[in-house]
Each structure stands twice: as structure tokens, then as C-alpha cells.
Amino acid sequence: MKEITSRQIAQLVRNLCIQANTILPQDLRNAICEACQREASPVGQAILGDLRENFEFAQEKMLPICQDTGMAVVFVDWGQDCHLVDGNLEQAVNQGVADGYIQGHLRLSVVGDPLRRVNTQNNTPAIIHLQMVPGNEVSITVAPKGFGSENMTRMKMFNPSVTQQQVEDFIVDAVSQAGSNPCPPVVVGVGLGGTSEKAAILAKRALLRPADQWNEDELYRKMEQRLLERINGLGIGPQGMGGSTTALTVAIEPFGTHIAGLPCVVNLGCHVTRHACGTL
């Protein structure tokens, strides 16, 4: 049985908070650069060039890519052959988030109560999603989520009689209604199936899929590609200024569901859909 200390967890989370907010994943860097080459609008092309300059400068100077350094969403895939010692997982993750945001000089954007609205001054509490997996490793992904994009989340509890076309129309409409609010070009995460909360988690996890990878299932791969074409045909464009690049990719994560329904959640990531992963 491999032992993992709470201090190791906190230190890894700290480092990932800083990394995620200052270094854009390579797949998204590539996607923005490629979009810049094929963007039809001169204004859109110029904006994509500015976005590229921004993430390059942020990495060089170790500064936040965006002023909204988000609420920390932390995915913990815990190997079943690992044992946590010297502490509590939730406390360790929140300590890591607090250290990362304070020591990394990242904006503190979290309030401790949704109605009292008093800033916690350390960006906690984090949102923690834990799942047990085989093996003797602990994999942690920190995905800071800004609320310009998070506020554009949409859910629909479809009846089982819904057609695939109607589901696709709902997803496209979610992006259309969001307009420029989520700072396009966006990453479109879709959770399909399960229950309402499962679909929401699936949609958030979908944002972590590399931008250059499609679903392995042919049905969903073709659906993702069709949706991307339709969404980019909306004309919203980079930062909502018009153009042919409204989304960088679409990722659908399906899950089994009840015979009486079909939950669908659309969660949008902005052009800096940030995340960083580490393993203990």
C-alpha cells in the first residue's frame, strides 16, 4: 500500500493552481494558432493573433493568462492502492488552493457564502470531484473556471422521445445564446445522460479532453464534428467580433441514463480553458 501525505497533496495542488493559470495547455495553444491561419475574418484573425501573444507573454513572465483566475475545480483520481496519511483530503486540497492563489498572486474571487458574499481571501473552497481508480497513483487535475463562461451553462432534461437533431439544436442554441459572454473561441463541453448532477460533471470533465481529440465512439465523433461546423457557422467569431472561429472544439461525454429521461448539460470553456495535471 503506497502512502500519500496530505502535505504532498497540498504542494501538488499549489503548483498546479499556478501552472494552470499561467501556462495554457499545448493542445489549446495549437488550436488557437491553427484557427488564426484559417480564420476568414481579418478582425477575427487579428484577435486570435492577440490571444496568441497574450498566452505567450503570460508564460514567459509567469503571469495569469486572464485576470479572472477562476474558482478552482479539482479532479482527484485516487488509486485504490494508495493510502492518505497525516490529514484529510478535502483540507489538503483547499490548503493547496489557498497557497497557490496567495503565493502565486492570483486574483481571489471566491466568497464563503452565496448570499452573504464575503470574500474568503484565499480562493477557497475548491470544488472537488473524487473518483477511485485502479493502481497506486493519485492523479490531480486543477481546472480554474472563470464565471464569464460558467454563467453560460445550460441544462435541459429531455424526454426520452427527443431526437438527436433536437439535442444538437439545443447545444448549438446554448452557444448562440451565450454570444460573446464566454470570451470565444470557446471549448464546448457536453454531458449527456446520467442524472442532472452527473451530466453537469461530465460536461465539466469534457473540457479537459485535448482539443485535437475526438470521441472514440463513431456516433459521438460525427456528432461533435457536425456540431463544431454548425457552431462555427454562427458567425459569433473571436471575442464576439464576427468570424468563422466561434469554437475550437466540441467534446461530448455520454453516460447511461434512466429510461424516462435524457439529461443534457452544456458547459462552455473560454479561449483559455485552463487546466494542469500532476501525479503522485
Image: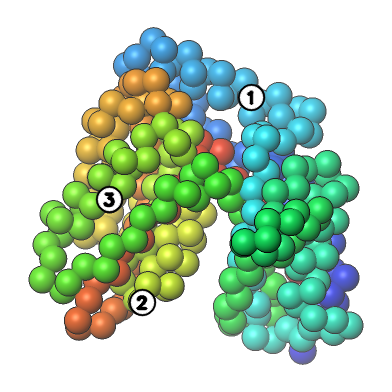
**Residue 228 on image: x %, y %:** 29, 41
Q: Which residue is mark 1?
A: 54
Q: Which one is earlier in the sequence, the residue at label 1 or at label 2?
A: 1
Whole-Å distance between the Cαs marked 1 and 2? 39 Å
Q: Which one is earlier in the sequence, the residue at label 1 or at label 3?
A: 1
Q: The disc labelled 2 sits on which kind of residue? A: Thr
**Residue 234 on image: x %, y %:** 25, 31
Q: Which residue is mark 3?
A: 171
Residue at the extreme bottom of the image, as rendered: 1
Using a 10 Å C-alpha cutoff, classify the residue at mark 3 as few (fewer than 14 neighbours), some (14 to 19) or many (20 or more).
many
Residue shown at 10%/71% (left/top)? 161
Using a 10 Å C-alpha cutoff, classify the residue at mark 2 as few (fewer than 14 neighbours), some (14 to 19) or many (20 or more).
some
Using a 10 Å C-alpha cutoff, classify the residue at mark 1 as few (fewer than 14 neighbours), some (14 to 19) or many (20 or more).
some
Residue 111, compared with residue 68, is above or below; it is below
- Cβ atoms under marks 1 and 2 closer than 8 Å: no
Residue 78, compared with residue 67, is above or below; it is below
Mark toward the viewer: 1 or 2: 2
Q: The disc labelled 1 sits on which kind of residue? A: Asn
Residue shown at 55%/47% (left/top)? 147
